[in-house]
Amino acid sequence: MHCLRLALGLGFCLLLGITLCSLWMYVENWLLVSYIPYYLPCPEILSQYPQPKLLEQKPTELLTLTPWLAPIVSEGTFNAELLRHIYQPLNLTIGLTAFAVGKYTRFVQHFLESAELFFMQGYRVHYYIFTHDPQAIPQVPLGPGRRLSVIPVPGPSQWEEASMRRMEAISVHIAKRAHREVDYLFCLDVDMAFRNPWGPETLGDLVAAIHPDYFTVPRHQFPYERRPVSTAFVADGEGDFYYGRAVFGGRVARVYEFTRGCHMGILADKANGIMAACQEESHLNRRFLSHKPSKVLSPEYLWDDRKPQPPSLKLIRFSTLNKDTARLRS
Amino acid sequence: MDPRDFWGNRTKSCLCLILLFAVLLGFYSNVFSLIPRRQTEKSQSPEAHHVQGRRESLTLSEGDGHLDSCRIPEVPRLLYPKAQLLKPSRVDVLVMTPWFAPVVWDGTFDSALLDVQFRNTTIGLTVFAIKKYVVFLRLFLETAEKYFMVGHKVIYYVFTDRPADVPQIALQDGRQVVVLHVGNYRRWQDISMHRMEMISNFSRQRFLREVDYLVCLDVDMKFSDHVGVEILAPLFGTLHPVFYAADRQSFTYERRPLSRAYIPRDEGDFYYAGGFFGGSVPEVYRLTTACHQAMTADQAQGIEAVWHDESHLNRYLLSHKPSKVLSPEYLWDEQMLQRPPLLRKLRYVAVPKNHAEIRNR
């Protein structure tokens, strides 16, 4: 009698466990997106474009390939027309997240207007504006195939607190809806504006942008988190580029893994009572060191207008708005 | 029921419960460790419908290379020199095509970094040694053991009509030779063209399950320097050593509109060599199937492309742009060509042969 009950109990637990396992696997699969072919199919009628010249005579000023063979995107490295012919037939939807929390709601208008002019022209775009105050988001007229969703988030008590929760909010949002709605997702800072076309040359599995303040600087001067106790710790002899937190993106599933990874690191640090030197940016850089981006955007895609534009950067596409940061953070 | 018996029973059931718990824990920890692998497998859904041309549906398995599967490879801490953004690695040559495919030259990549990114990858190498071409196998395989994908798992697929003549080569750990017995054809052109058909068939039958990437090579060559995972991409081609600096008008594409390999004079990126191409198994399958179908259609029309399978390869790579392009370092002929200074290394070179003697015997 006792053995029978034990056996029944064992059988029941096994059954329960298997059900939970399969449920879990099914849930995980919700997060995966449809397969996008990475060979780049061209339509039968190709537009005429110049033949690539193998023996380049003109000196290229910027590095165009990372040591792990990821392209570094800058003006002159790609043929926009060719890429348009390649990517347009894929019927992609590109998502764009921006956080307008606290006083940052005032930037949304200009951000969206400039995005309407320059961001992914000719593609389906879905803006996700995360804000604590949906009423403060202005109505900006959007072009065809472009829509906007306002995602409510709790208001910040402090600026640092708000920026640290961004990774969590993005990963949760992807899991809840973005994975169904978009193919690629870019996560941008809202206190910036588009100045020139930002197109499919930026699409990739996992995309990072080089921070404009550190691209000429040796790695030991990067503002990495240098305390070993933090999960964002980067040792002295390590580092590829210093990436900016204001621009990153990629395939939706990759961005999900990336933001979750960063969020876990932030949580672990919080549990140890540590806040990384550059908050979220330190964790972003740590993650990009061990999960190298498959495409890197040059500082043309993340520029600071207060700096003079160097000749190596031909076309600034996305840059800061001058603002009084001290006033904003209060 | 007396108290002693009661407590005996309680202890026994407690012990049983603890044992049960331990068993379940052991069981489920194994199941959960299987989940990430299963997830990679399930993430490959069939390709989008907008892909042009006829495609055979191919179930993709976890055998896909890491670039195909939904994972950015994680690299452990490594020490290596930092890339300088304002110092291009090579200024004398193009290192990236206008569609962002890297052109792989010496100096553009860091082998240590790439080896770590590709550490769990199995590479398949296909080579055809039909009729007298078996004589090239020894040198080919011996040099491959020295230079090809060292440190990674490799399977050499040797297609031959003379399995007994395949030499026994000492192989490193994790590498094996698989001899595939196939038929031969009378003309060397037919042998060359039917490579596509055979690779296509075997891709579906076995390569998909056994390897992540396929590299399809000519046998009358030898390796003379490092050929590693820097070449691996979903689809890659190699620049033909004769035409790497030529204008597209002088490429020896098939120029007769009747052929399926036809490319007009104002089109074309590069002239790719038929002796070194590859990619992930699904992509190589698509390429070889498309080329084989095109060649069959041509045969029905009574036309044979000027450079046979190489013409069809070029036609395919024009409309399906490769995700990496290998420089002529990866395919060179020292007897035929003067080595320019831009070629810092020669990695895979032709072995001198007497064409008349070797072919059609």
Image (cartoon, rainbow, N blue to C red):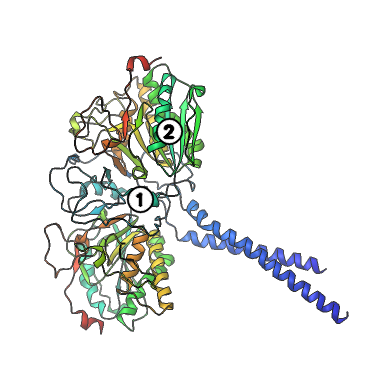
Type of amino acid at the residue the image marks with label 2: Thr
Can see residue A317?
Answer: yes
For residue B310, above or below residue A158: above
For residue A235, above or below residue B137: below
In the rendering, which numbered label is found on residue B60?
A: none
| A123 vs B346, nearest the viewer | B346
Per the image, label 1 sits on a secondary structure element best described as helix
| A142 vs B90, nearest the viewer | B90
Chain letter of mark 2 equals B
Residue A127 image position (x, y, % from top left): 30, 66
Left or right, B208 with reference to B12: left
Residue B296, quarter of picture: top left
| Real-space CA distance between mark 2 and mark 1, rounded to the nearest whole angstrom | 25 Å
Residue B178 image position (x, y, % from top left): 50, 33
* Residue denoted by label 2: B126
Q: State which quarter of the image contains the N terminus of chain A.
A: bottom right
Type of amino acid at the residue the image marks with label 1: Ala
Per the image, label 2 sits on a secondary structure element best described as strand
Q: State which quarter of the image contains the C terminus of chain A.
A: bottom left
Callout 2 environment at 10 Å: few (<14), some (14 to 19), or many (20+)?
Answer: many
Can see residue B260?
Answer: no
* Residue denoted by label 1: B112
